[in-house]
Image: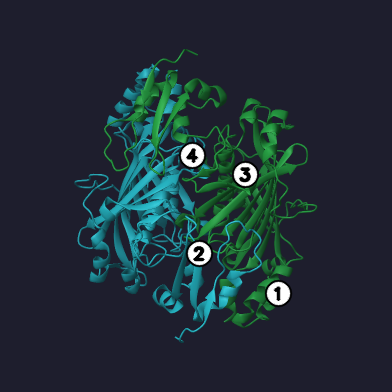
Chain colours: A green, B cyan
Amino acid sequence: MAAFSHTITLPVRCQLSIGFNHDPIKNSLKLNTASIRFVKVDALGQTASLQTSSEAILAENGSNPIEHIRQNIPTKKQFVDPYRHGLIVEGGVGYRQTVVIRSYEVGADKTATLESILNLLQETALNHVWMSGLLGNGFGATHGMVRNNLIWVVSRMHVQVDHYPIWGEIVEMDTWVGASGKNGMRRDWLVRSQATGHVFARATSTWVMMNQTTRRLSKMPEEVRAEISPWFIHKQAIKEEVPEKINKVGDKAKYINTNLKPKRSDLDMNHHVNNVKYIRWMLETIPDQFLEDHQLSSIVLEYRRECDSSDIVQSLCEPDENGILGRGLSGGNEMSLLNRFSSADETVQVNEFLGSLPLKCTHLLQTRGADKNEEIVRGKTEWKRKQSAMSFRSK
Amino acid sequence: MAAFSHTITLPVRCQLSIGFNHDPIKNSLKLNTASIRFVKVDALGQTASLQTSSEAILAENGSNPIEHIRQNIPTKKQFVDPYRHGLIVEGGVGYRQTVVIRSYEVGADKTATLESILNLLQETALNHVWMSGLLGNGFGATHGMVRNNLIWVVSRMHVQVDHYPIWGEIVEMDTWVGASGKNGMRRDWLVRSQATGHVFARATSTWVMMNQTTRRLSKMPEEVRAEISPWFIHKQAIKEEVPEKINKVGDKAKYINTNLKPKRSDLDMNHHVNNVKYIRWMLETIPDQFLEDHQLSSIVLEYRRECDSSDIVQSLCEPDENGILGRGLSGGNEMSLLNRFSSADETVQVNEFLGSLPLKCTHLLQTRGADKNEEIVRGKTEWKRKQSAMSFRSK
């Protein structure tokens, strides 16, 4: 690459000026053989100057220097990020982000949707890597992983939700990582009410590395282990001695949605169908009437295969015949069990009673091929009655 | 309602404690005849105590006191909100929020989706009302509107996007309101790069009031005018002398998606299909190949009728035969026009050239009834080629 001799100074940001005669984005189209002096004003109004070599930026991940400036991914560990409301905790290895539940993240009942919670888990995980100074690309791969052409692939995820945060509520999300076997990584989360410290949700997940070209799983290279293992801790958000395996749902499942096709808007930065879409497909098999009165309290996902934009997907759901859901959804005696409790004061007991007899479903997403089907993800969900539904019924 | 004598102190939030033996949510189920002393620790670690009468809370909007504490909607004007990264600007009447573009808000090309931008417009508008101390319910109605059983209904929206922010980018979103005729309100937005001040997007919208029960439009009551008119300013994000009317697309439109059914997850706090879903339905009629190479630069929406969960919707799209899109989508000469520009340095000129000959579509969403169809929303979109697509084609 050519030597850098040309320096361009981008305009200092003026907090109160709205009109802007200069178009830095158009001008900057020609910056790719220049070194860039970038002057910015931070949250506290202090001015920082950042000199960046575009060769260094381009060398590693192929992103262009303008993208780099606009994203401003740290190359050294950061302890606080005022814009993300993030900070490093847990003795320097964990990450905490404070988020406000936004109006479009809640459903008709004004509580955050499961999809929003999963989106926020993904966001905080990426921001943890962002803060670490290790982030090499858009999906949380470290610099060492980028050098080895490796990406992260999630193999299992377990989310428990005790209470859904409501619109406008401030929650603290903690996330941290640990070892999982020799070549994997565990990532956990804890979601708390900022006001009271009450735990709303917890989650754990396991991740392995995949070669981006061959799509084959990879051992963890030593240089990657050296990057990430200093961040590992033993703490677990959900204690799972031997994680329960999920049975395969047969083709004669009670609820089946067929012919599901990923849309352009379902694809993420990796050009694969986003995890959150999987969950939407899973939950859409469940009858509306049941969703009206119940909330998901736990979901386990076992990932088997990637899904891309050309796949045609089938979503199967089998209610667990040993739980109330099986009987409830089969026209059984769920209501008679609930009707034993009639006064509002007994709401909590009803809830605890249902807690000991969880309503469960087993799920499967698979691609429909000409000669065979291939599993994308198995799932297991647990449900409890909504408090509002219970008060209504008990009146 | 009974006199309040009983005071319950909720636990002070301990920043570093994760274990929590106390369940304030369960305990607080019985708080509805109590006045509540709520101790919280703010962003700067300062302790504030807030004494709230649950009668006052329940009187106005029927929400329960626990919800009120968890949401903590201000009853007086706030000038700064550290959690939302929000502040009052424009001499005390405008609102500015700094947001980070999150990983799940971007599409496969790593730029924020139009849906994400619209979600953020909605969020900042609500947060503006939140900060004003006027917020009476979940969809931006003021206390006076709640007393008059009125809700806001959007009648028109126009969004222009010059540049889409990318993943991790920090943007400043300004929003403010003005009068629109005698009984309406205009709300505008300006979205800028935080680093450079460059304007990415601007938007304007008009709102009227509707009686929540009768679903009929209402004049603006004097008490509501007294609440909101001190916030009105004349500034306009998009100058529109006489807003262009959108023609109705006929039933023989070039692209039609039929049998669209709202899902539970498409409903918002008002139990109506969310605006953002409308836009998804509109854009899904456009062929993938076109969306691959083009980005939306402008969208105008004229709302006609609400859509609820029982409606079955049809989305029609007619490319404008006077624009390149019409010819491009009809297998015409779009490529020959673009191929006149062959060197990378001419990218900007290509863009400017296309800017003068916009690619346009007219859209219609309507419900399919047994005897007649009813219009939900008319739309007009304008498109330009993506820079990446242009560089690729010109090689």
Q: Mark 1 is on which residue type? A: Asn
Residue A340 image offset from top left, x and y in percent? 68, 81
Distance (Cα) linking label 4 and label 1: 50 Å
Report which residue position mark 3 lands on: A92
Tell how many labels: 4
Report which residue position mark 4 lands on: B168
Q: Which residue is depicted at the point 28% across and 41% down? A: A18
Q: Provide the chain ID for the residue under circle 1.
A: A
Answer yes or no: do the residues labelled 1 and 3 have beta carbons within 8 Å? no
**Looking at the image, which is closer to me, A23 or B340?**
A23
Q: Provide the chain ID for the residue under circle 3.
A: A
Answer yes or no: do the residues labelled 3 and 4 have beta carbons within 8 Å? no
Distance (Cα) linking label 1 and label 2: 45 Å
Q: Which residue is depicted at the point 39% across and 35% down? A: A40
Badges 1 and 2, same chain: no
Badges 4 and 2, same chain: yes
Residue A277 can be seen in this image: no
Which one is closest to the eye, mark 1 or mark 2?
Answer: 2
Q: First in sequence, mark 1 or 3: give its number.
A: 3
Determine whether, in the image, residue B47 is placed left or right of residue B212.
Answer: right
Q: Mark 4 is on which residue type? A: Gly
Which one is closest to the eye, mark 4 or mark 1?
Answer: 4
Distance (Cα) linking label 3 and label 4: 22 Å
Q: Report helix, strand or loop for mark 1.
A: loop
Report which residue position mark 1 lands on: A333
Q: Mark 3 is on which residue type? A: Gly
Q: Report helix, strand or loop for mark 4.
A: loop
